Image (cartoon, grey):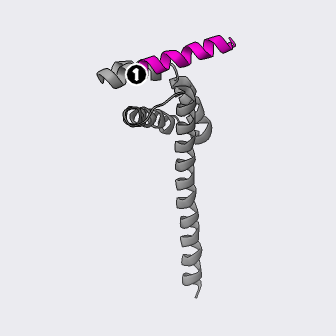
Amino acid sequence: MFSTNKQIEFERQLDLTLIRQFRKTGKLDLLSDAFDKYVPLLYGVAYKFLKNRTASQSAVVLIFEKLCIETVKTDINNLRQWLYVEIKDYCYKILKDQNADLSSFKNWQTERKMILSN
């Protein structure tokens, strides 16, 4: 089902209302209601990058924790966009760390071979 501009704007306004209510009351269930509808999107993005179910689930949980903190500090005007950027950045960071670990391990193996061959 395709979303129309009116539906998208309605969802955005609903998210803003829930976020404002959360900031006033501190009730986590309000923020959770806004977040829950984006969980499939977030999991899909994370799985696309990480290709691991457990890591993708952990990424979604960590993004929710970050949302809880950032919502109090900053004003989030477009929750869907904010969540998408955050999950993508988190996955890039994880992949970069994994790649750095892999390249440093390869460098260590190369140096080890050079030392052992002498």
Q: Is residue 115 magenta?
A: no
Quarter of the image containing the C terminus? bottom right
Q: Main secondary structure of the magenta part?
A: helix
Q: Position of residue 21 (x, y in %)?
A: 37, 19
Q: Residue furthest bottom?
A: 118
Up/down of 95 relative to 38, above or below = below
Give the residue drawn at x 52%, y 48%: 94
Disc 1 crowd, CA 10 A, few/some/many (<14, 14-19, 20+): some
Q: Tell me where the magenta segment starts and ends, as one range.
A: 1-20
Residue 27 makes an appearance in the image: no
Q: Amino acid at mark 1?
A: Arg
Q: Is residue 19 magenta?
A: yes
Q: Position of residue 88 (x, y in %)?
A: 57, 40
User: Can you tell which quarter of the image residue 23 is in?
Assistant: top left
From the viewer's side, name the closer residue of 27 and 50.
27
Give the residue drawn at x 67%, y 15%: 5
From the viewer's side, name the closer residue of 110 and 1.
1
Quarter of the image containing the N terminus? top right
Give the residue drawn at x 57%, y 47%: 92
Q: Position of residue 98 (x, y in %)?
A: 54, 54
From the viewer's side, name the closer residue of 109 and 78.
78
Residue 60 makes an appearance in the image: yes
Up/down of 56 relative to 40, above or below = below
Left or right of 30? Residue 44 is right
Up/down of 106 relative to 76, above or below = below
Left or right of 19? Residue 82 is right
Q: Position of residue 13 (x, y in %)?
A: 52, 17
From the image, tell me which residue sits under label 1.
20
